[in-house]
Image (cartoon, helix red, strand yellow):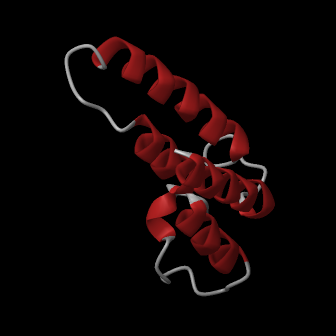
Amino acid sequence: MENKNRIYQKAFALAEKYLISDPSHGLDHIKRVLQLVDYIVIKEKTQKKIDSECLRLATVLHDLGSQYQVRKLRSSRDKFKSGLHLGVI
């Protein structure tokens, strides 16, 4: 458990460092999804075995790759590069 918590803290620190200020994919979005994950775990845990630490880690990391794409697109003149599906242009 302690190791999982340390990994989660490092992942959250990465999210704080690299997520841009964007209501759709920024840190505020991550915090909202974490609240939703906690709610779902509470509601479903009595019926199913759920690894809540794994879900929380996935939540924190799920948009880090898209932020890289957003930054690349914003700095590129080529609007056909991968990442266009993000709807940021």
Name which residue lies at 60% across and 29% down: 32
Q: In this view, does 87 lie to the left or right of 70?
A: left
| Relative depth, front residue between 86 and 8 | 8
- Quarter of the image that includes the C terminus: bottom right
User: Percent x, y for residue 11?
Assistant: 64, 58
Eyeballing the image, is 23 above or below 57?
Answer: above
Direction from residue 73 to residue 39 in the image, left or right: left
Farthest-out residue, front: 2
Nearer the observer, 52 or 65: 52
Q: Identify whether 78 is placed above or below 68.
A: below
Frontmost residue, 54 versus 60: 54
Estimate the x, y position of residue 81 in percent, counting from the top left: 50, 83
Question: Which x, y percent locates residue 51?
Answer: 35, 38
- Looking at the image, how many numbered discs can be counted on the residues? 0
Q: In this view, does 40 lie above or below 6?
A: above
The residue lying at 75 percent from left, 56 percent from top is 13
Closer to us: 62 or 51: 51
Q: Where is residue 30 in the image (x, y as percent from the top left)?
A: 61, 41
Residue placed at 41% from the left, 15% from the top?
42
Q: Most extreme residue toward the left, as rendered? A: 47
Judge from the rendering whether residue 53 lies leftward or rightward of residue 10; answer left or right.
left
Residue in the picture at 54% in, 56% down: 61
